[in-house]
Amino acid sequence: MHPITRRILNTYQEISRRKTFGIISHPDAGKTTLTEKLLLYGGAIHTAGAVKSNKITKTATSDFMEIEKQRGISVATSVMGFNYRGYQINILDTPGHKDFAEDTYRTLTAVDSVIMVIDSAKGVEEQTRRLMEVCRMRHTPVLVFINKLDRDGLDPFILLEEIEKELHIHTRPMTWPVGMGREFKGVYDLTQAGMRIFAPEKTAISEKMQWVEGLNDVALPGIIGEEAARKLREEADLIEGVYEAFDESLYREGYLAPVFFGSAINNFGIRELLDTFVRIAPPPAARQTRQRTVQPGEESFSGFVFKIHANIDPNHRNRIAFCRVVSGRFVRNKFYTHTRLGKQIRFSGPTSFMAGEQSLVEEAYPGDVVGLYDTGQFKIGDSLTEGEQLSFEGIPSFSPELFKQVINDNPMKSKQLEKGLRQLTDEGVAQLFIEQPGNNKIIGTVGELQFDVIRFRLLHEYAASCSLIPLNYYKACWVTASDKNTLEKFLTGRGQHIAWDKENRPVFLAESEWMLNVTRQAFPGILFHFTSELRPESALEN
Ligand code: G4P
């Protein structure tokens, strides 16, 4: 075989065995526990408790230094990879802490599907709703795991209805719980028509769990009780009557979520989830650039930076840019084009961060994430290629919710302050808006914590001190209009509420929802957008 043909074939093989996904949930639903159990099944770790470090603990909310420390540790768990049934599975870690929600949104641009964890007692929660909005924007396939069935929770039918109504996605149960809490007997596998009997097993994978064939197995009532067996038969009938057969293509298009029930802490229901996941989850998908669609099977390498992590070692001001490989093959020490800077760069120490272990990457394929050591050349959204001028789309900024004006406390250090603000906002820590005239700087974030992060880092990394004065804004909306005159008129008419983002795009700073509505009515020709991708404003309104 010709070497080029062999290489292309090899790349195709590598692509088709990769599954890159994120686990998302409202804090405390069980994301960390599920991640850990998946790694346990994949043999990437051998004892429970090994990934707890990727979680920012609740007690640390007011202690920013503690959070930074934990974030430092979390670099190690940014990507967790394992092999399962011949598949290379990459889990991208998404911070659960609300103040880092924007990090999570961006990480979702680098996954091909997600598993959403829902606490059976709490149902759909605030973060679940927001994260689902982001998935919907990108038609990301979603698989749902309803967790903590070992505790009393909501009725499973009610949970499914809530998911459909609140998350605007169709559901299809794949397994079904029998009882809950103390009465939890196990899950019935609707696709294989068999029941796995619950046996709590916290630390290791238990393959000893009892399996009962079919609903009519005479042994069933003896094991789970007459009443539970009767109810299960009734509910299974109802499900088959109400729900259509699972349609994989609808799942892949992001319209239908298969739903699993279990208890992550007890290793229960995970095997069913994982087996279905590897069977149906999509391989690395094509990605849109401003110029064209890039297919993973293309020969030339391309990738984009979706996350930048700074200050892993406070003594060296190093940063790691996480690059998702989109097409071709990434090779260590080869020159690639940084398309925004038009510069050739090569990476001698690309790193993979796999479940706490760092290792040197010699080559990587679509779906993989490589950590690139960076001295400040990368911004979130930057693209790397083999020369072609491509810019990947869809790494949006989201309208911040908290705003503060930056006051320079030391005029001798204004250059450092400028530089620090620019670099930290390039990293995606927060967003920067500038009011003109006057060059007033406003920082916008989704959480109070980022303000502490910014002040601390400005002082320690750039020797710049500043005060941050709270501003009473409700949202910053990117504004567009179909013609220049309308836009000009608006920008002049509402001048005192206009600022400019770093790309020099106008942003309207609304003091309240009411004010936004009034302005919208006064300027019908103006479109207000809640993400910098300039999507329709409904996209992230809630
Ligand atoms: P998160 O990453 O989504 O924030 O959640 P995490 O996995 O840390 O789980 C949150 C809490 O829920 C943890 O308890 C965890 O042990 C518990 N949990 C996870 N899965 C299950 C389950 O299937 N059943 C039950 N009953 N509990 C579950 P914690 O007390 O907050 O922490 P820890 O002391 O157990 O570590």
Image (tube, grey):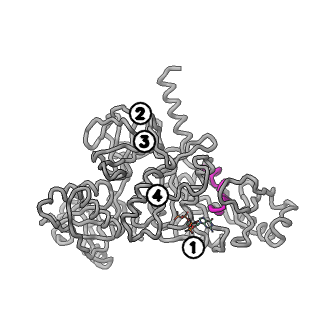
Q: Nearer the viewer, residue 488 or 208?
A: 208
Residues at marks 3 and 4, CA–CA distance in whole angstroms: 19 Å
Mark 1 touching mark 3, by CB under 8 A? no
What residue type is disc 2 on?
Val
- The image quadrant that residue 498 belongs to is bottom left
| Mark 1 vs 3, N-terminal side | 1
Q: Is residue 140 above or below residue 370?
A: below
What residue type is disc 3 on?
Thr
What residue type is disc 1 on?
Lys
Q: Nearer the viewer, residue 312 or 191?
A: 312
Residue highlighted by disc 2: 331
Residues at marks 3 and 2, CA–CA distance in whole angstroms: 12 Å
Q: Position of residue 532 (x, y in %)?
A: 32, 59
| Mark 2 vs 1, N-terminal side | 1
- The prevailing secondary structure element of the residues shown in magenta is helix
In the figure, is residue 128 to the left or right of 468? right
Residues at marks 4 and 2, CA–CA distance in whole angstroms: 26 Å
Q: Is residue 308 visible?
A: no
Residue highlighted by disc 4: 94
Mark 2 touching mark 1, by CB under 8 A? no
Q: Position of residue 75 (x, y in %)?
A: 43, 52
Magenta highlight on residue 276: yes
| Mark 4 vs 2, N-terminal side | 4
| Mark 3 vs 2, N-terminal side | 2
Q: Is residue 532 above or below residue 512?
A: above
Q: Which residues are magenta?
A: 262-277
Q: Which mark is residue 351?
A: 3
Q: Residue at x 20, y 66 (%)?
A: 466
Q: Which mark is residue 268?
A: none
Ligand 1 falls in which quarter?
bottom right
